[in-house]
Image (cartoon, rainbow, N blue to C red):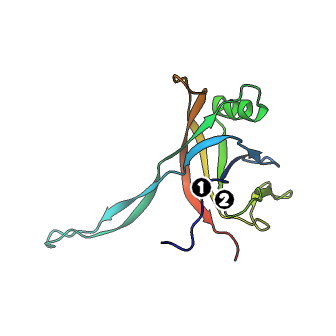
Amino acid sequence: MAKNFVFTQGTDAYVHKIGATDVIDLACIESVDPGTTSRGQVALTCLQDTEAQFAPGLDTPGTANFVLIVDPTSTVQSELYQMYNNRETIEFVIGWADGTAAPTVDAETSELDFSSADRSFIVTECYISEYNFTFEADNVVKANVTLQLSGKTMFSPKPA
């Protein structure tokens, strides 16, 4: 059995609007998939080669998604939906359950700051490409939110 692992219970998700001085805590996330990035390839095969040769190409960011249990009275969820409607670029942050601190924002630069955090984080720049409400029998109203990633996803491990 693995000795060093992190449970999923206690995971938090946050949104930081680019240039804003605060971080929004997305309460009541039911599930989250931070997405993938695939790496392209550059062909280096010469005509006289008998096997194909490649070098790593550009990274192509994919999509991330999360399921949110909808609270129609939540100002945070209303603000998230407004970000979708306004086509805003955001930073999506997943705070692992190996700690409890929320990310902070540097007051001078308006950039995310993880220097005082006691947990691991995954951070990616993105925009909300889909925000779909779902109504299923014997359930609560949920929103399936899809994020189009842009650039690299950063992993910031919990400080030792």
Q: Residue at x 55, y 58 (%)?
A: 152
Mark toward the start of the polypeptide (2 vs 1): 1
**Percent from the top left, x then y, of residue 15?**
70, 46
Q: Is residue 74 above or below residue 95?
A: above
Q: Is residue 28 left or right of residue 61?
A: right
Residue for badge 2 = 97
Q: For numbered disc 1, what is the local secondary structure?
A: loop
**Percent from the top left, x then y, of residue 35?**
50, 51
Q: Residue at x 62, y 36 (%)?
A: 68
Three-letter residue code for mark 2: Ala
Residue ranking furthest to the bottom: 160
Three-letter residue code for mark 1: Thr
Tag 2 near tag 1, CB within 8 Å: yes
Of residue 159 and residue 137, the one placed in the foreground of this image is 137
Q: Is residue 140 above or below residue 45?
A: above
Count of numbered badges drawn on the protein? 2
Quadrant occupied by the C terminus: bottom right
Q: Residue at x 66, y 38 (%)?
A: 88
Residue 125 tag number = none
Residue 8 tag number = 1
